[in-house]
Amino acid sequence: MIRDITLGQYYPGDSPIHRLDPRIKIIATVLYIVELFIVNSFIGFGICAGVLFVTVAISKVPISYIMRGLKPILLILLFTFFLNIFMVDGRVLWKIGFLKVTDNGLYTAVFMSIRLLLLIIGSSLLTLATTPISLTDGIERLLTPLQKIGVPTHEIAMMMSIALRFIPTLLEETDKIMKAQQARGADFESGNIFKRAKSLIPILVPLFVSAFRIAQDLAMAMEARCYRGGKGRTRLHEMKFKAKDIWALIALNAFLVFIILERIYMTKVGG
Amino acid sequence: MSIQVRNVSHIYSKGLPDEQLALDNINFDIYDGEVVGIIGHTGSGKSTLLQHLNGLLKPDEGTIIIGDVDITKPGVSMRDIRRRVGLVFQYPEYQLFEETVALDVAFGPKNLGLRQDEVDDRVEEALELVGLDYEEVKDRSPFDLSGGQKRRVAIAGVIAMKPQVLILDEPTAGLDPGAHKEIMQMIREIHRTENNIIIFVSHNMADVAELSDKVMVMDRGKMITVGTPAEVFTRRNRLAAIGLDVPPVTEMMYELKDRGVEVSTNVLNLKDAEEELYRYLRGKKAK
């Protein structure tokens, strides 16, 4: 079950999306998120979803794989959905006890759920189609201007890449420890909430011990290879925009303009 | 108590691009009181197989019968399986979590729902069985012990559940030669007192040859050979083909034979090697 978490995971492939400059992909994801918030109609969402699914299709990441990664987020999605459905005022449609469902509530609930869903799929596509290393390289390059005001961009990027790198390691470690404790008869699935919380101790203590051990080993290994921060460091692979990156950038901007126009148009029609 | 494994297959990440056939139609029997050594390369499916025997993983195909219970059937009680089969993972010292050694060893028996006095008895018994002084270690923190001692505590945590089948995944990995020897001695001692089935994975062929009644050889998810140590280790070329060695003593006899010394290679330990060399030298003198 723990293997099912695809958050922040990379899906190996060699599609045009995989080969795109990571900076473009990061910018694209940020723009896409902004666009999702610009849109205020279902038609707009339809366009966004269409663009997203075309991108997913090009990236050749199977839809089923992405959907599997959504499972853990389903709970949050349902929570927002029901919160909206019951909390927003408007014309009452149904009434169940003290709970009432309004037309505005229903509308907002569906609206927010779609927005959230598209947001999660869109941002997970970024990590699915970009290796962690090029992702952090991209972030580092994008943050470079901030160096002028003293932001340690290299260190931030290094921290991020280490964190990303160790998500699978720690998941594996958790899996191993859980199995070891299960072999000793530990039960994580039954009992009330206090009993369940207590049953996590046999996992959390060894996990923390392991995490510190791994961190220490890594620090030692980095030092042994003379790592001393980003100062004066050069790269083997210099990032350069290629023709396809420029085209992607143009397409992105066109899409942004289109979405803004759509919003203006829809507001006019609506108002 | 016996174990029957029939047509067991397991696939990791089924339906994904990294799909992998980890176990491919595995069949074997283990009988009461046997010590079984499993050898094979990293990634040959040994650990996956062990986790099946304890119900932590379910096979995609096939059945595993332990005693009179088919543990692959849905609805079988996991607690029941774990009472019968104890599994000690690789580097088991990383699973220690309690404040004191005694509390940590008690974790398993307590989960079985035993009474407190029975739990205490078992903790003491298990710690003595792994060669630790109960009075000395019981109130210490498991994190203050040495590597070899930690591993003993972790193993005690499993044998305190008194499993009829004890499985150890590379019990001597990462230990110095002294601790290595002690752990092997300890396994022998556990088998002598508990008379249970012991299944262990090892990369040390001398250990496997010396301790096992039965040796199983795995390669890329398949069970290549099952036999006595003598049967398995007399096929040096076959083992070499999948990147495995024979015990050092046996290797020496093979080397001698290759250089024209007419000795038998059917030798697994130092004592037999000594006898065989005497026999050879005496025969030479007679000529």
Image (cartoon, coloured by chain):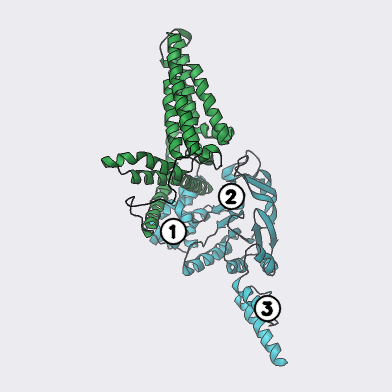
Please report the residue visible at 53 percent of the width from the left and 67 percent of the height from the top: B185
Number of numbered discs: 3
Quarter of the rendering containing residue B276: bottom right
C-beta proximity under 8 Å, tags 1 and 3:
no
Q: Is residue A210 above or below residue B235?
A: above
- Give x and y (percent) for residue A115: 46, 23
- Give x and y (percent) for residue B83: 57, 49
Task: Tell whether B192 sits left or right of B117.
Answer: right
In the rendered image, the residue lying farthest to the left is A149
Kind of residue sitting beneath label 1: Lys
The mark nearer the N terminus, 1 or 3, is 1
State how far apart marks 1 and 3 are (Cα): 44 Å
Q: Mark 2 = which residue? A: B51
In the rendered image, the residue lying farthest to the front is A243
The mark nearer the N terminus, 2 or 1, is 2
Q: Residues within 10 Å of mark 1 (few under 14, many from 20)?
A: many
Mark 3 vs mark 2, foreground winner is 3
Task: Tell whether A211 sits left or right of B129.
Answer: left
Is the residue at mark 3 from the same chain as the one at mark 2? yes
Q: Which chain is cyan?
A: B
Q: Mark 1 = which residue? A: B150
Q: Is residue B139 visible?
A: no
Q: Nearer the viewer, residue B63 or B66?
A: B63
Kind of residue sitting beneath label 2: Gln
- Give x and y (percent) for residue A2: 51, 40
Q: Nearer the viewer, residue B223 or A67?
A: A67
